Amino acid sequence: MTHLSCTLEGDLAILCLDNPPQNRLGVQLIDELRQALHTIETSEVRAVLLRANGPDFSYGGDIEPWPDWTEREMRTEFEAFMQTFNHFERLPVPTVAAVQGLCLGGGFELAVRSDVVFAGESARFGHPEQSIAIVTLLGGVYRVAERAGRSRAMEWALTSERVPAAEMERFGVVNKVVPDAELDDAATAFARKIAQGPTKAHAAHKALLRTWAVGGVAAADEAMFDIALPLFETEDGRTAIPTAVKAMRSGEPRPAMPFQGR
């Protein structure tokens, strides 16, 4: 029985955690996620939707085998988990997460690696790690800090508070909160919309933000033109820029472009 599915629907890939009711992240699910990411990268998809079956997005890591792992085994498995999460975060296409119910621990760490996070009104987010005397092993605390600030991330890590979606939206961890019944439709519609955009430009924005996250504004400025100038030679750029110039000269509104993602 698989714990994760990957479905390609035209320009959109749908990754679905499928081990309800808790959708815990174990070795099998991470292996399946790694294979799914390879499938996505060797396809023509232009956006990814991450969702989960069941009432809750994920309770986090499958801790059941941990007491039996040696330190060496633990490091090997957790490094593989981290590499897979990093791979998802660095996909060269936009990623959207749709989060319902509880989104805890490793599940939270996976969701927050998406470019855009939609959440149902009843969703709750949290770091339960301190309750078992460990830390957010897959980079969650500092990725939340990147969005919400250090002090708020530290508070949530210290308390393991289950933070409502509305508060996560207020602090910038979640992009949009929608009624629970509308979550799948809203997130899917948004993902399909951005899948029709200038895919290479989206990838460039991701690269610039990653450079900024690592090295700050100065590093992003330094990398800007190496990342940005090739966009002028893409098929989308060569079509859209002259079209925009023509509209400007004629005083007409800029038309919507049928971007091809190349």
Image (cartoon, rainbow, N blue to C red):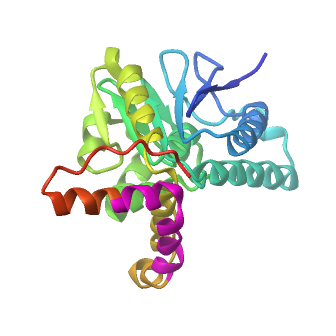
Above or below, 54 relative to 79 = above
Above or below, 52 relative to 192 = above
Residue 229 lies in the magenta stretch: yes
Q: Position of residue 138 (x, y in %)?
A: 61, 52
Q: If the image is split into quadrants, where does the N terminus sit?
A: top right
Q: Position of residue 248 (x, y in %)?
A: 19, 61
Segment tinted magenta in the rendering: 223-242
- Viewer-closest of 77 and 9: 9
For residue 239, which quarter of the picture? bottom left
Q: Which residue is pictured at 47% across the width and 82% down the height?
A: 219
Q: Is residue 131 visible?
A: no
**Residue 37 placement, left or right of 160:** right
**Residue 1 placement, left or right of 7:** right
Q: Which residue is pictured at 45% across the width and 65% down the height?
A: 209
Q: Position of residue 85 (x, y in %)?
A: 64, 49
Name the outermost residue toward the left. 251
**Residue 229 placement, left or right of 27:** left
How many marks the image carries: the answer is: 0
Magenta highlight: main SS: helix
Above or below, 24 relative to 182 = below
**Residue 76 placement, left or right of 45:** right
- Viewer-closest of 116 and 76: 116
Above or below, 159 relative to 191 = below
- Viewer-closest of 32 and 139: 32
Q: Which residue is pictured at 84% across the width and 44% down the height?
A: 69
Residue 193 lies in the magenta stretch: no
For residue 16, which quarter of the picture? top right
Q: Is residue 257 visible?
A: yes
Q: Position of residue 33 (x, y in %)?
A: 71, 37
